[in-house]
Amino acid sequence: AGRYAIGTIMMQLVNMRDGGFISAHDYKLGAMIAEVVCGGEVEAGSLVNEQWLLDLERKSFMELLDHPKTQERIMGMMQTGKPVRN
């Protein structure tokens, strides 16, 4: 899918964020998921191997774990069993 698919998803995420349907952190999370699912910044039709996708996923996951809002969400779920909307 590559960068063009990421761009399409990003447009939808911007609309959802600006419309108040998702938070800024939801936007960040969605952008990272889009990058991983679409295979990163590659040309449409490019073939990537499993390790490429795993590396993208690991990079995004570790970056999110370092973010305070992600940590709030994890702690909230562990303490209350309910999602934190931040």
Image: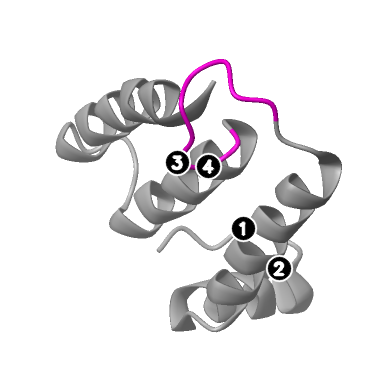
* Residue marked by disc 4: 40
In the image, the segment drawn in magenta is 39-47
Q: Secondary structure at mark 4?
A: loop
Are circles 4 and 3 on residues that touch, CB within 8 Å?
yes
Viewer-nearest of discs 1 and 3: 3
Residue 77 - label: 2
Quadrant location, the C terminus? bottom left
Q: Amino acid at mark 1?
A: Pro
Question: Which badge, 2 or 4, comes first in the chain's sequence?
Answer: 4
Residue 40 visible here: yes
Residue drawn at x 42%, y 45% as measured from the top left: 31
Asked if residue 13 lies left or right of residue 46, the reply is: left
Q: Position of residue 54 (x, y in %)?
A: 78, 53
Residue behind mark 3: 41
> Which amino acid type is shown beneath numbered disc 2?
Met
Magenta stretch: includes residue 51: no
